[in-house]
Image (cartoon, helix red, strand yellow):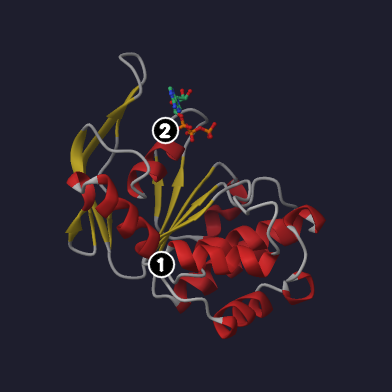
Amino acid sequence: MITTNNLSFSYSENVAFRFPDITLKEQEHLLILGASGIGKTTLLHLLGGILTPQGGEIIVNENNITHFKPKKLDDFRGKNIGFIFQKTTAIASLSVSDNLTTRLYFSGLPSSKETIDSLLEQLDLTAVKNHKPHQLSQGQLQRLGIALGVIHQPNIILADEPTSSLDDENCKLVIKLLKKQAAKSKANLIIITHDQRIKDEFTNTLVL
Ligand SMILES: Nc1ncnc2c1ncn2[C@@H]1O[C@H](COP(=O)(O)OP(=O)(O)OP(=O)(O)O)[C@@H](O)[C@H]1O
């Protein structure tokens, strides 16, 4: 569950944003659309606690995270938020499997071979589990990005332009995978995009 009230943020006097309020009940999805530069990534980073709003508040599962101290926010983010970035944040020197083990560690969770193997299987990455990120294809890298965003079963999955560089077939596949992973961890799924192809896949949309 996530609620925002009167959120505002500015990078400078000239680059300032006021965002519409968001209310998502358990497991609801939201697609955020809008022109380039309108503030979509900024909003996603506010929702995930990467940026702190100058005004308003963000409530995640009854926790008002707006005024959390940095350490508490880091812990909260590690356990509850799953980010999927356009470009993978995998560690180059580690294998696919070890990247997932490391992500679990940073979320304060024990390494679980079963959890990792099962997720790799679902994302069709088993064959490359011992490969380093640079040995993966674009599609495999994209799926590793999803794995890294969901391995710790977050309550909120935040995806930044997850389909923009994909062909139609892989675009559909990624959306299906994101919805499936969100259902599995009973998470809210919030996607920002200007990819019009995925508009029809979501009933709940917010245009900035
Ligand atoms: N760290 C920063 N410092 C200063 N200005 C920034 C910073 N990050 C973003 N901006 C500015 O804030 C505005 C909104 O950026 P943001 O990335 O949130 O937009 P967006 O809607 O996600 O754009 P796009 O669709 O092109 O990714 C842009 O004008 C951008 O230049």
Q: 175 and 160: which one is in front?
A: 160
> Going by the image, does 155 lie left or right of 128?
left
Q: Amino acid at mark 1?
A: Pro
Q: Nearer the viewer, mark 1 or mark 2?
A: 1
Using a 10 Å C-alpha cutoff, classify the residue at mark 1 as few (fewer than 14 neighbours), some (14 to 19) or many (20 or more).
Answer: many
Q: Residue furthest top?
A: 14
Q: Which residue is mark 2?
A: 39
Q: 186 and 127: which one is in front?
A: 127
**Residue at 61 percent of width and 82 percent of height:** 118
Residue 58 in sight: no
Residue 137 higher or lower than 180, as above or below: above
Q: Secondary structure at mark 1?
A: loop
Residue 107 higher or lower than 46, as above or below: below
**Residue at 19 percent of width and 59 percent of height:** 63
Indicate if the residue with disc 2 has its beta carbon within 8 Å of ligand 1.
yes
**Residue 24 pos. (x, y %):** 29, 60
Q: Which residue is mark 1?
A: 154
> Dividing the picture into quarters, in which one does residue 170 lie?
bottom right
**Residue at 52 percent of width and 70 percent of height:** 151
Using a 10 Å C-alpha cutoff, classify the residue at mark 2 as few (fewer than 14 neighbours), some (14 to 19) or many (20 or more).
Answer: some
Q: Amino acid at mark 2?
A: Gly
Q: CA distance from mark 1 to mark 2?
A: 24 Å
Q: Quadrant of the C terminus?
A: top left
**Residue 155 pos. (x, y %):** 36, 67
Q: Which mark is residue 170?
A: none
Q: Secondary structure at mark 2?
A: loop
**Residue 82 pos. (x, y %):** 45, 59
> Dividing the picture into quarters, in which one does residue 75 lie?
bottom left
Residue 131 in sight: yes
Dot placed on the residue nearer the N-terminal end, 1 or 2: 2
